Image (spheres, rainbow, N blue to C red):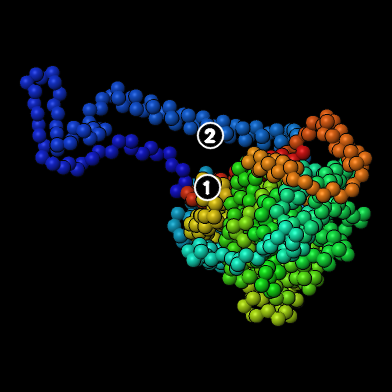
């Protein structure tokens, strides 16, 4: 039920008594009488009701009132701060920028949500007037339409006409759409449960990829490294000022014979100062004997896919058998190649070995904690289960090792979508290559700490797959895969997990649910609103048990992100302009203290060993180092961080809060609380109060 103003009883009497009572009466009448029910009665807690006087009751009530006032004051301060932020950002516009809408296509979803808000406000006005005048026609489940004799005025007539129109036309449409979304919700929940059961089975049976024998043996010093395959390591980057140094340092310290390893730094930066800094870092490691090459494209087309495609066209690539790819913020451990490359031996059908991500800043703020929940489930459940039972999953674009032959036979890197990693994975799967996911091999990386960066990342991750689905559907149907694998690729991999999930999440919880508050005939059942979502959130949070205190914020935030994911899904499916956008995720360049100490220790050990110098001119290196030192010493201008106002999220916040007020009038308890908290969550996100702000 809705919030109640009644006060429950603070003291309850215990009518059960055990044992034989013993009454001890003292001769002096000034002493009290003591009743003992048993041998240990004197040592048990005394009944709270016994012996209380008016003074004790007064003190108890004062203490409880003090606690209540403290809670009310805390909630009041929180609401006052929220109202202050709303006033400062929405009314005065201090330190904020509005979310830009580049075309009418980008404004369509905002206008649609705005129309729902206006309609909800009109509905609420009708309901408030009816509630104040005592026109309660829904005390029972049967709809009662007043007769002509009951009409008391023109406003009452309009209200009755609205009831008839609502029951005959609006309610059936909402019921049909809600039933369709609930069916999709149940199908997606069943898929999520099957994945969790598969993960439990893997844990129970201790199933994981193993390496047979000792693949690399060093017979003597002269032949050291002769049995190690040739490995190419690529680090594509673009204006990565914050993270370039730590990623290059980590890759240069990989434990692999230097003559069997080549590192490519693929720099697409358009900032010349960043280019010089990266060149200086590359030259430093080249002087230490590392085979490292700096490449910069003059024509920057195709984003990351174009960068990788250009690098693979080099003549010397034909001498290498495998390629390991790391994004600029990834820091692999020295034993990464020794834990991944051996899986390719005696397994000619294996095309990809994917490692798991781990995050250096997962506890930085609430946004990174919620991202960690999602990605832990993605790696440990989705990718591990699909890797074990299907030998297929979407390549993550980084922290993986490809067999170069698999890349070439699958068509190489293509620039047709913004998810080039998923594109090459699907084409390799269609050509019969198998994938392995290593849950025990972890690579350190960084999560976006601002909502602006996270939103752009999610838009690319959800628009690209739908665009790719349009492009590769004919190839999937015409492929030689079995019917089961085709069905898994089309129905589960693309439709269910990439299209249906954002569609029903946004439609059901952000549109249909608030509308049902104004159309009681189409009310959603309690298990759809509460029980199933909470259970699904519980399953999602199992791979990261330390995040259990955040299960409620996680559920609310996932519903909030459904707006971005739905918009991205539509733009990718219908090839709108935003589906071609590629924005590099903003990074902070964070590293944990143990990681910094370990990196420093590895670098110190590397400095103590004799190295083969490569003949780079000392003058050129000194100039680069001087430039780097000059830029480090130069005073940096203060960075001004701005909050951003997100119109779609704010509009949905007011829609949900309006529906919560309507729910309060009809005393719908769980619906009221869900709408209230979900509306507040949309408000916090719309005002950019979650995560860090962008500079």
Residue that appears at 74% across and 51% down: 251
Which of the pair 481/154 is nearer the observer? 481
638 or 425, which lies in front? Answer: 425
Res 75 label: 2
Question: Taking 387 as reference, is 364 above or below it?
Answer: above
Q: Horizontal and vertical percent for residue 680? A: 60, 43
Q: Can residue 161 be seen in this view?
A: no
Q: Residue furthest left?
A: 27
**Can you give x and y, in whole percent of width and height, for residue 212 in the image?**
60, 68
Q: Is residue 307 left or right of residue 339?
A: right
Residue 114, position in %: x, y? 70, 51
Left or right, 41 with respect to 536, comes to: left
Secondary structure, mark 1, is: helix
Mark 2: secondary structure? helix
Q: For this rendering, which residue is in front, 168 or 520?
A: 520
* Residue at figure coordinates x 43%, y 27% from the top left: 66
Disc 1 target residue:
546
Q: In this view, does 477 lie above or below 28?
A: below
Residue 625 appears at what percent x and percent y? 86, 38
């Amino acid at each position: 039920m809705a919030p109640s103003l009644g006060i429950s009883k603070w003291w309850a009497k215990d009518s059960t008594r055990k044992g034989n009572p013993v009454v001890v009466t003292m001769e002096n009448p000034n002493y009290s009488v003591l009743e003992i029910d048993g041998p240990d009665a004197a040592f048990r807690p005394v009944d709270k009701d016994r012996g209380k006087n008016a003074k004790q009751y007064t003190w108890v009530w004062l203490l409880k009132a003090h606690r209540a006032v403290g809670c009310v004051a805390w909630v009041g301060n929180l609401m006052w701060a929220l109202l202050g932020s709303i006033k400062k950002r929405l009314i005065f516009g201090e330190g904020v920028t509005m979310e830009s809408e580049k075309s009418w296509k980008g404004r369509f979803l905002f206008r649609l949500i705005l129309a729902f808000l206006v309609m909800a406000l009109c509905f609420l006005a009708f309901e408030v007037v009816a509630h104040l005048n005592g026109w309660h026609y829904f005390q029972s489940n049967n709809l009662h339409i007043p007769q002509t004799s009951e009409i008391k005025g023109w406003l009452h007539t309009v209200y009755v006409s609205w009831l008839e129109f609502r029951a005959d036309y609006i309610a059936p449409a909402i019921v049909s759409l809600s039933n369709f979304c609930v069916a999709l919700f149940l199908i997606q929940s069943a898929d999520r449960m099957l994945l969790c059961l598969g993960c439990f089975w893997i844990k129970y049976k201790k199933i994981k990829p193993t390496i047979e024998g000792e693949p690399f043996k060093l017979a003597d010093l002269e032949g050291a490294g002769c049995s190690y395959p040739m490995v190419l390591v690529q680090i594509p980057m673009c204006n990565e000022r914050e993270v370039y140094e730590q990623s290059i340092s980590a890759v240069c310290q990989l434990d692999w014979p230097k003559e069997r390893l080549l590192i490519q730094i693929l720099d697409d930066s358009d900032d010349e100062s960043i280019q010089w800094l990266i060149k200086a870092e590359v030259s430093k490691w080249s002087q230490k004997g590392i085979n490292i090459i700096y490449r910069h494209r003059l024509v920057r087309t195709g984003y990351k896919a174009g960068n990788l495609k250009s690098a693979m066209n080099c003549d010397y690539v034909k001498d290498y058998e495998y390629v390991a790819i790391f994004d600029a913020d990834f820091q692999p451990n020295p034993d990464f190649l020794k834990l991944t490359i051996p899986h390719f031996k005696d397994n000619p059908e294996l095309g990809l070995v994917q490692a798991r991500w781990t995050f250096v800043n997962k506890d930085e703020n609430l946004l990174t904690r919620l991202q960690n929940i999602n990605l832990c489930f993605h790696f440990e459940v989705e990718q591990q289960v699909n890797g074990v039972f299907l030998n297929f999953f979407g390549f993550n674009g980084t922290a993986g090792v490809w067999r170069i032959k698999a890349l070439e036979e699958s068509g190489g890197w293509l620039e047709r979508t913004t998810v080039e990693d998923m594109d090459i994975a699907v084409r390799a799967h269609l050509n019969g290559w198998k994938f392995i996911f290593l849950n025990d091999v972890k690579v350190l990386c960084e999560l976006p700490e601002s909502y602006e960066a996270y939103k752009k990342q999610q838009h690319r991750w959800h628009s690209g797959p739908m665009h790719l689905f349009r492009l590769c559907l004919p190839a999937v149907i015409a492929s030689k895969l079995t019917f089961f694998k085709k069905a898994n690729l089309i129905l589960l991999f693309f439709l269910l997990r990439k299209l249906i999930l954002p569609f029903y999440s946004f439609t059901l919880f952000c549109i249909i649910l608030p509308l049902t508050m104004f159309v009681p005939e189409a009310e959603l059942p309690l298990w759809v609103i509460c029980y199933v979502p909470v259970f699904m959130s519980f399953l999602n949070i199992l791979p990261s048990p330390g995040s259990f205190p955040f299960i409620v914020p996680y559920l609310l935030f996932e519903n909030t992100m459904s707006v971005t994911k739905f918009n991205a899904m539509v733009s990718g499916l219908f090839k709108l302009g935003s589906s071609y956008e590629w924005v590099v995720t903003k990074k902070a360049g964070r590293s944990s203290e143990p990681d910094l100490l370990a990196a420093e220790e590895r670098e110190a050990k590397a400095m103590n060993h004799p190295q083969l110098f490569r003949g780079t001119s000392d003058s050129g290196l000194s100039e680069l180092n001087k430039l780097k030192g000059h830029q480090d010493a130069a005073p940096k201008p203060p960075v001004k961080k701005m909050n951003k106002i997100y119109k779609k999220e704010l509009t949905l916040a007011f829609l949900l809060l309006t529906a919560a007020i309507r729910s309060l009038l009809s005393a719908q308890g769980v619906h009221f609380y869900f709408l209230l908290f979900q509306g507040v969550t949309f408000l916090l996100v719309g005002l950019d109060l979650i995560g860090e702000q962008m500079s």
